[in-house]
Image (spheres, rainbow, N blue to C red):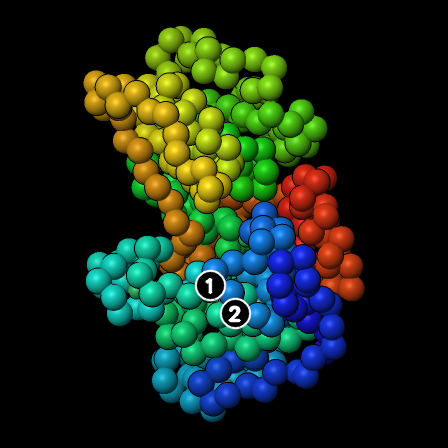
Amino acid sequence: MKALRFYAPEDVRLEEVAEPACGPGEVKLRVRNCSTCGTDVKIFHNGHQNLTPPRTIGHEIAGEVVEVGADVNATYGSDWRVGDRAQVIAAVPCGECHECRKGWMAVCQNQTSVGYQYDGGFAEYMIVPQQVLKVDGLNRIPDNVGYDEASAAEPFACAINAQELLGIEAGDTVVVFGAGPIGCMHIRIARGVHRAGPVYLVDVNAERLKMSADAVRPDEVVNAAEVDVVERVMKLTGGRGADVVITATAANVTQEQAILMAARNGRISFFGGLPKNDPFIKCDSNLVHYRQLHIHGANGSAPEHNKRALEYISSGQVPVKDLITRHIPLDDVLSAFQIVKAGEAIKVTVEP
Ligand SMILES: [Zn+2]
Ligand SMILES: [Zn+2]
């Protein structure tokens, strides 16, 4: 079968490999969709400390069950059968550490990842490892949800995790930095799940802003390359500031702007990580103190968030179909990375 294998930074090969065999405690999938995100591009260029090469990459996965190991259903109390449609978590918690036992699986100390320690989804077939099955990380796809939509459940789950920490209330003003696919999902979750009020989308790339705004229709689009975004948000909110600010970018300045534009009792999510070699920002601590700001981190998602994502897609609360703007065959997977890098599509999915 064909698989996209990472050997070293800038050395990623689509090659012929043996079809993987399914062990007694594993499930084998025919991958139908594996979507791409900025992480894939980062891995392509820089690799990752937890990734042991050569490794099949791809972590936003949906596929069809083609083999169920003999021990699986008895061990995990599941009922997987050949032909079932399934979505796979990407961040795999251990289920046993202090954080997992507290129910904070997104910050498991021993987290492993599909596409890092286990072969991922840019391949015709893949094995769902025991570690995923053990934490209930293989999810049934509802009948009315397509494989392409289901593959977007993983990034969607990360946004759900972040927003659940923010306590968004009906009518809250929400600012989202970053007009990529995840910024679009944040806007849809804020409205569809948390009943947010006005939502403003901020980016510095006019084309990407337009493409995403056409899809998710924010109440206002702010091009931070052209206007002072803090001033603009203050004006839009009558001088009060934004109740909720989510930074879905890797730009340090957006975190600083988020603190400057937050309303009293404002809640901020530092959703996007900053560059490893420059992770510092300037913060007026007295703003945080006197305005009672709440600054939250967000690290991936837990299995439960993936399940919730599939439910929200199925119920129509948070549609994702129209955000998947490119479908690309596995043979052209490297061009998918180029499209992601250039920001020419909202979400790109690969179909092995
Ligand atoms: Zn991703
Ligand atoms: Zn753990």
Q: Taking 210 as reference, is 277 above or below it?
A: below
Badge 1 crowding class, 10 Å Cα cut-off, few under 14, some 14 to 19, many 20 or more, is few
Residue lying at 47% horizontally and 77% vertically, measured from the top left: 129
Residue 92 at what x, y percent from top left?
Answer: 41, 65
Measuring 25% from the left and 66% from the top, which residue is drawn there?
A: 97
What amino acid type is highlighted by mark number 1? Asn
Q: Residue 38, position in %: x, y? A: 59, 47
Q: Quick check: 239 above or below 349?
A: above
**Quadrant where the C terminus lies?**
bottom right
Pointers 1 and 2 in contact (CB under 8 A)?
yes
The spot of residue 309 in percent (x, y) is 47, 52
**Which image quadrant shows ligand 2?**
bottom left
Q: Is mark 2 within 8 Å of ligand 1?
A: no
* Residue 233: image location, x then y, percent: 46, 15
**Residue nearest the viewer, comparing 253 with 344:** 253
The residue located at (39%, 34%) in the rendering is 280
Q: Residues within 10 Å of mark 2 (few under 14, many from 20)?
A: some
SS at badge 1? loop
Residue occupying the far front of the picture = 277
How many numbered circles are shown? 2
Asked if disc 1 is less than 8 Å from ligand 1, the answer is no
Judge whether 145 appears above or below 77 on screen: above
At 64% from the left and 75% from the top, the residue drawn is 125
Residue 151 visible somewhere in the drawing: no
Helix, strand or loop under label 2: loop
**Corner quadrant of residue 204:** top right
- Residue 293 seen in render: yes
Give the position of the N terminus as an image quadrant: bottom right
Q: In front here: 10 or 77?
A: 10
Q: Please name the amino acid that badge 2 sits on.
A: Thr
User: Disc 1 designates what residue?
Assistant: 50
Q: Which residue is mark 2?
A: 52
